[in-house]
Image (cartoon, rainbow, N blue to C red):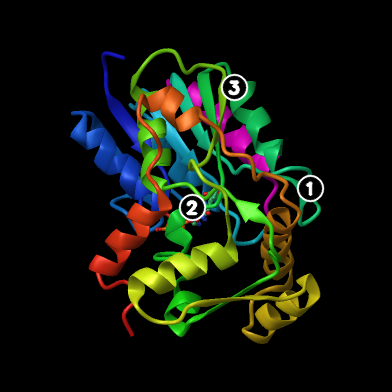
Amino acid sequence: MTQTDILVTGSTGKTGRRVTESLRARGASVRAAGRSARVRFDWNDESTWEPALTGVRAAYLVDRQDQPGAWDAEAEIGALAKRAVECGVRRLVLLQARTTGLVGGKDLGAGEHGVRESGAEWTVLRPNWFFQNFDEGVLLDSVRAGEIRLPTGDGQEPFVDAGDVADVATAALLDDGHDGQVYDLSGARALTLAEAADEISAAAGRAVTYVPVTHDDYVTELLSYDVPADYAGFVADLAGQIRRNLNSTPTDTVERVLGRPPRGFTDFVRDAVARGTWAV
Ligand SMILES: NC(=O)c1ccc[n+]([C@@H]2O[C@H](COP(=O)([O-])OP(=O)(O)OC[C@H]3O[C@@H](n4cnc5c(N)ncnc54)[C@H](OP(=O)(O)O)[C@@H]3O)[C@@H](O)[C@H]2O)c1
């Protein structure tokens, strides 16, 4: 692409932040957008869409899943993709998730139709669970507390580094050859939550234990922390995908796209310990 102005939505999030860095490292000019960014972008406020989209050549789209009951991915992403093309955006890279079947009663792949049918060049990224759930996201407090309670049983997940996802997104935004591709992105090794906890425990030098809980008990726990019911069910269902080993086979996509192997979990853990992330 000759013009390299790229819109990054979700630019404060785990991948968006890294996509912004990775694009800038390659010399691209980035419009980093978000609800509190200088360039405002809010899925709930359509008046923010056009100013964010106008004048960019490509866009990285991160959807939102904080209110799964109210989120109609197909309609919302479809509407945004249509608006993007009307605004002159030529390439769309959509972040989704690697899931199988319904999650919280929903097909999480439904949002993909919007970019596929937009008329723009498109790439869909479907990563497994990120390493960064352990040090930035939903599992951070549990790791610090020394107890990861999840309904994942002894199912395995080939966790992936958000930095690898960002590098693949950057390639899809800047380089040719990714149009019409759906990339399932995983790390090289599938781990149970107990194995992940053991690695963290050994590297951090203190006990971090995985405690298996049932789906229903997990939902009840989340509700007791005032998590909305639809979100609690959604997260429990996502964990159930791990329990049932639905997405547990590692893929070679990161290496195929980037020409290097994905980052390993051990390296991620070593770095997080060195940063003092889990120190209490
Ligand atoms: N976490 C994982 O393991 C994982 C694995 C596979 C796929 N994914 C996918 O990654 C996506 C984001 O998840 P994440 O874990 O990366 O979350 P995250 O780090 O919390 O990032 C979410 C981003 O979305 C933005 N956002 C939230 N509500 C918004 C709204 N109404 N309008 C505009 N932007 C909004 C947030 O920005 P502001 O709050 O600054 O506005 C933030 O930058 C989801 O689609 C999820 O399916 C996640």
Q: Specify the amino acid type for callout 3.
A: Ser
168 lies above or below 142:
above
Q: In the image, is residue 251 part of the stretch drawn in magenta?
A: no
Q: Is residue 218 left or right of residue 197?
A: right
Helix, strand or loop at label 2? It is loop
Packing grade of label 3 (10 A; few <14, some 14-19, many >=20) is many
Q: Residues within 10 Å of mark 2 (few under 14, many from 20)?
A: many
Label 3 near label 1: C-beta < 8 Å? no
Q: What is the CA distance from the residue labelled 1 to the residue labelled 3?
A: 24 Å
N-terminal of the pair, mark 2 or mark 3, is 3
Q: Nearer the viewer, mark 2 or mark 3?
A: 2
The label number, if any, that marks residue 130 in the structure image: 2
The answer to whether the residue labelled 1 contacts the one labelled 2, judged by CB atoms less than 8 Å apart, is: no
The C terminus: image quadrant:
bottom left
Mark 2 belongs to which amino acid?
Phe
Q: Residues within 10 Å of mark 1 (few under 14, many from 20)?
A: some
Q: Which residue is mark 1?
A: 102
Separation of marks 2 and 3 at Cα, in angstroms: 28 Å
Q: Residue at x 35, y 18 (%)?
A: 175
Q: Is residue 92 left or right of residue 221?
A: left
Looking at the rendered structure, the secondary structure element under dot 1 is strand
| Disc with the residue nearer the chain's start (1 vs 3) | 1
**Mark number, residue 75:** none
Corner quadrant of residue 79: top right
Mark 3, residue position: 118
Marker count (numbered): 3
- The picture places residue 145, in percent across and down from the top left corner, at 46, 84
Which of pointers 1 and 2 lies earlier in the amino acid sequence? 1
Residue span colored magenta: 69-89
